[in-house]
Amino acid sequence: MDAFFASVELLRYPQLKGLPVVVGGGRRRLEELIGGLPPDTPLDRIPVSAFPRLADYTGRGVITTATYPARQFGIGSAMGMMKAAKLCPQALMLPTDFDEYRRYSRAFKKIVTDIAPLMQDRGVDEVYIDFTEVPGGQREGGRVLARLIQKSIFDATGLTCSIGVAPNKLLAKMASEFDKPNGITVLYAHELAERIWPLPVSKVNGIGPKAEAKMAGLGLHTIGDLAKCEPAWLVQRFGKAYGAWLHEVAWGRDDRPVETESEPVSMSRETTFERDLHAVRDKAELGAIFTHLCEKVAEDLQRKGYVGRTIGVKLRYADFRIATRDQSLEFYTADAKLIRRTAGLALKRVPLDRPLRLLGVRVGALVKAGSAEAQAPVRRSGSRPPAAPAGPVTASLF
DNA sequence: TCTGGGGTCCTAGGACCC
DNA sequence: TCTGGGGTCCTAGGACCC
């Protein structure tokens, strides 16, 4: 989906069309940010001048989506709001409304599966679709079906998407970015050298900033550079699995099926504080946040019908380093109090003598609530977690 | 006043078991 | 002075993705 969050917002606020708009930032609702309007002003009649602007922003948020006009200024997703404000202070700013995006996400996915039932979820705004067995799915290399899906989504929601059709998921994902927004690209296997090899390695789904930097150090910049490398040479430098995978990817090979079902592995809640907190000085505030995170994750588990037996905490220090601690139970749970108590034990094992910026709680090793596994106690033969170290800083805190 | 939140998967070492 | 081999589980960190 093209600029998904922002596009959904523009459906509500069409008066913002064509303007630089960013979605992201704070916890506050838009109504709190817009002042001085009659209470029942229709959303599409709120004057543009009433919307908050990036220039007014103070906080630690990041951009989740920017409209194409905002991108002209160099703003992109994951960029800090304060940095974006310097690039385009006049950009209008809307808080993230996940519930609304989820509604549209469900709507567009329903349209897709009504047309092509083999669909894999790739998050709120992206899917893989298997055209193979869909009647007409091969016409014009898939372009006809892609057009039907694109038009059906637009007619029902007013949202645009970009579609890549290719022999496998790896290539389809890359092809989908060739023509944005609202484009369709059909990519054939024989076009690999011509259309894929010139691309930078970072365009491959699975090559991130670290791998890209390492490759740059080896003089590898494009996917074609990668394709020229001997598999053994790649394995030597990038490890057995990753090196072999890099070679496959560079040659456009990918045999992963479109997976229509998947079970969650973990559920978590985390929050970045408005200011850094200290475990001693801000103990009460931290404790309240900690308990709240445990309650939220327990709610999530219960609502979705899962129980888990590995409880984890995550800290981000002011210097952005991350520490995690896990603590496994001998039975499954979705109980807030038990999660809180167990997470508290995990928290005692992590250094708390430095300012904190984020706290998170995770429950992993999930199974369906009420399933056979969920009932039986788990026999553990692995290592026991180490006892909490006694110390003046850590021992007295939670 | 740089840098969110929710995920998955991989690696590597140590504990533990047979 | 010398101490296996194979397998699983657990934990911590990190890369990557949407």
Image (cartoon, coloured by chain):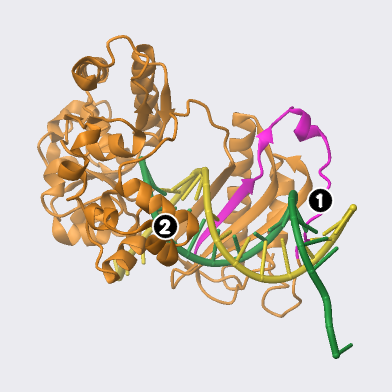
Chain colours: A orange, B yellow, C green
Q: In the image, A370: left or right of A104?
A: right
Would residue A161 be seen by someone viewing this image from the given angle? yes
Identify whether A335 is placed above or below A381: above
- What element does badge 2 sit on? helix
Q: In the image, A321: left or right of A362?
A: left
Instruction: Please check whether the numbered discs 1 and 2 fall on a single chain.
Output: yes
Identify whether A396 is placed above or below A127: below
Say the numbered circle drawn on residue A243: 2
Identify whether A144 is placed above or below A321: above
The kind of residue on which mark 2 rests is Gly
Q: Which is nearer the eye, A119 or C8?
A: C8
Q: Which quadrant of the rendered structure holds the C terminus of chain A?
A: bottom right
* Magenta-drawn segment: A357-385
The kind of residue on which mark 1 rests is Arg
Residue with the most extreme top position: A135
Q: Residue at x 78, y 29 (%)?
A: A372
Identify whether A256 is placed above or below A207: above
Q: Which is more foreground, mark 1 or mark 2? A: 2
Local crowd at mark 2 within 10 Å, few (<14), some, or many (≥20)? Answer: some
Q: Which quadrant of the rendered structure holds the N terminus of chain A?
A: top left
Local crowd at mark 1 within 10 Å, few (<14), some, or many (≥20)? Answer: few
- What element does badge 1 sit on? loop
Q: Residue at x 72, y 41 (%)?
A: A335
Q: Residue at x 36, y 30 (%)?
A: A127
Tell me the distance, in whole angstroms, between the alpha carbons under discs 1 and 2: 34 Å
Quadrant for residue A15, please give it.
Answer: top left
Q: Is residue A166 magenta?
A: no
Which residue position is annotated with label 1? A380
Would residue A28 be seen by someone viewing this image from the given angle? no
